[in-house]
Amino acid sequence: MTDELELRLDSLAGVGPVTTRKLNDAGIQNIMDLIVRGPVEIAELTGMDIDSSSKICEKAREDLVKGGLIAKDFISASELYKKRQTIGMITTGTDALDTLFAGGIETQALTEVYGEFGCGKTQFCHTMCVQVQKPKAEGGLEGGVLYMDSENTFRPERIKSMAEGYGLDPKEVLSKIHVGRAYNSDQQMLMVDKALELATKHPIKLLGIDSLTSAFRAEFLGRGTLAERQQKIRAHMRDLDKFMEGTNAATVVTNQVHSNPQAMFGDPTKPVGGHIVGHTSKFRIYLRKGKAGTRVCRLKDSPHLPESEAVISILEEGIRD
Ligand code: ATP
Ligand code: MG
C-alpha cells in the first residue's frame, strides 16, 4: 500500500474544486483519508452537513472497492486469508521473547507492554525500533519507525548503542526513526492521523507509542472524570485500529499500571485503560523486575497463544536472553 493510497480527491466524481479545497483545508488529503475518518468526523472538520459528507464518503468507498483497494462490507475468507498472508513478523532479538510471541511481534496488530516504572517498557520500544530495521533474513522488516514520545524518554544514544550491538550502522538506523513529542492527549490523538498519512508515503513498519495512556491519565485525574477519560482512550484505540487496518505496520505501545484494590487474589497490578486497551491489543506483555536484575515477561490474554513467561536482561546493547 503506497502510492495507490494517494488517490486524489479531485478524481472523485461529483466533488468540485470548492469541496476539494474545503477538505484540504481540514487536513484531508486523499480518498483514503475520507474513508478512515468517516462522515461524522468529515462533517465536524469541514462544517459541511452530514448528508453531504455521507455522500462523499460513500462515493469514496465505492471507488476504493472498485479499485480493489479496500474490502467490500463482506469479504470472502480467502481474501481475508490473502491479507493475513502479508502480515510481517519482527523478531525481538532474544530467543526467550521470540518463543513467547511465537516468532516475534506482528504487523497489522498492536502489542502492549505494561508494568511498573523501571521495568523496561521504554527499553523494549527502543529495541524494536532497531529490530524492525534489520534485514529480513535476520528477522527484521527493513522498515522505518514512527515514534510518539509522550514522556520525553526517547534516547537516540540508546538506539545508537543497540544498533552497534547488532552490527548495524547507527547513523542509518537513527535516520529512519521519526520521533514526535506528544505533549497532551489531544496532540497524541492527532499524531495517529499524521502517522497514517506518513505511513502511506514512507516504508514505515513500526509505530511506537511510549506511553499510550500517561497523558490521558494525567489530564483526567480522579474518579469523577474516569468515564470521560475512558471514552477518549476508546476513541484513541479506534484510531489505532484504523491505522493498523490501513497500513502493514506493527504497533507497540507501553502502558502504566495501577493497583486494583478490589483484587482479593493474585497480583492486583492492572494495566491502565482496562478492557478498552486490552480489546485492541493482540499481545499484552506484563513486564516485572525479576531476580538479579533480570526482567520477567508474561504474555497475558492472547487470542491464540497460551499464557507463558520468559526471562530477559536489559544490557547496554539492548535486550538479551
Ligand atoms: P517508566 O514506567 O518509568 O517509563 P520503563 O518501564 O519505561 O519505566 P525503562 O526506562 O525501559 O523502564 O527501564 C529502565 C531500566 O532499564 C533501568 O532501571 C535499567 O535497569 C535499564 N537500563 C536502561 N538503560 C540501560 C543501559 N544503558 N544499560 C543497561 N541497562 C539499562
Ligand atoms: Mg518508560
Image: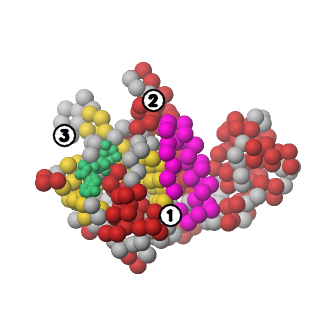
What residue is shown with label 1?
A: 176
Residue 5 in picture, x, y percent from top left: 67, 61
Give the answer, above or below, for where 251 lies relative to 238: below
Give the residue type at disc 2: Glu
Mark 2 vs mark 1: give the one in front: 1
Q: Earlier in the sequence, mark 3 or mark 2?
A: 2
The answer to whether one can see residue 82 in this image is yes
Badge 2: how crowded within 10 Å, few (<14), some, or many (20+)?
few
Residue 11 in picture, x, y percent from top left: 81, 58
Are the residues tagged 2 and 1 within 8 Å (C-beta)?
A: no
Q: What element carries label 1?
A: loop
The circle drawn on residue 273 is none
* Colour mode of the rendering: secondary structure
Mark 1 vs mark 3: give the one in front: 1
Q: Which of marks 1 and 3 is nearer the N terminus?
A: 1
Which segment did they paint magenta? Answer: 178-205
Q: What element carries label 2?
A: helix
The residue positioned farthest toward the bottom in the image shown: 137
What residue is shown with label 3?
A: 266
Residue 302 in picture, x, y percent from top left: 34, 54
Is residue 204 rendered magenta in the image?
Answer: yes
Q: Distance between the residues labelled 1 and 3?
A: 42 Å
Q: Distance between the residues labelled 2 and 1?
A: 32 Å
Badge 3: how crowded within 10 Å, few (<14), some, or many (20+)?
few
The circle drawn on residue 219 is 2
Give the residue displayed 54% in from the left and 36% down from the top: 186
